[in-house]
Image (tube, rainbow, N blue to C red):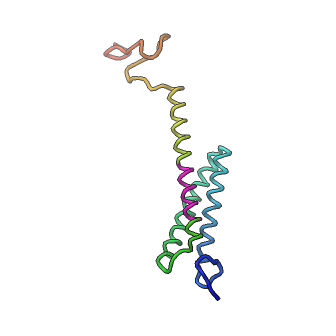
Amino acid sequence: MITSLEDPLAPGAPAELEVPLAQLEGRLAALGQALQQSDADAVDRAGAELHHALVTAVEHFHRAARSGGVPARLRRRLALASAQVAAQREALARATASLDRAIDVLMPRTAPRMLYSSAGATERALPAGGLLA
């Protein structure tokens, strides 16, 4: 009988890698769903669970790599999961930057010694001694 590293039932195949990898993929899916629903609490929970699943999967894969190797199929799945994490991180960074720009439009940052007037923020500077001078 010929066995290969691609055969998940092959003797010595790292079947123990399937569980943490499946958990990682599940946590990625949960985070994606929470992001689509714009549920901040669910995003926080899913993010924490994803972090834990990622740490666990990396530990398992590291041990497997030291003790004989990881099947190419599982390496590809881990690489895909890693790419999905990077894509979600980038999407969150873009959304955060967009939110920051919107907040800046709604609440512009003024010079520390300026007041608003009917003409805008730059028309009325505070006197040198402040409001009481």
In the image, residue 56 above or below residue 124: below
Residue 114: which quarter of the image?
A: top left
| Residue 27 point in image, percent of width and height | 62, 59
Toward the viewer: 9 or 35?
9
Toward the viewer: 111 or 78?
78
| Residue 118 point in image, percent of width and height | 50, 10
The residue sitting at 53% across, 47% down in the picture is 90
Residue 121: which quarter of the image?
A: top left
* Quadrant in which the N terminus appears: bottom right
The residue furthest front is 2
The residue furthest top is 118
The residue sitting at 48% across, 10% down in the picture is 119
| Residue 47 point in image, percent of width and height | 58, 54
Q: Is 82 one of the magenta-colored residues? A: yes
Query: In the image, is 30 to the left or to the right of 116?
Result: right
In the image, residue 91 above or below residue 132: below
Q: Is 103 one of the magenta-colored residues? A: no
| Residue 36 point in image, percent of width and height | 66, 46
Toward the viewer: 2 or 125?
2
Query: In the image, is 132 to the left or to the right of 48?
Result: left
The residue sitting at 38% across, 24% down in the picture is 112
* Quadrant in which the C terminus appears: top left
Dominant SS type (magenta): helix
- Residue stretch in magenta: 77-89
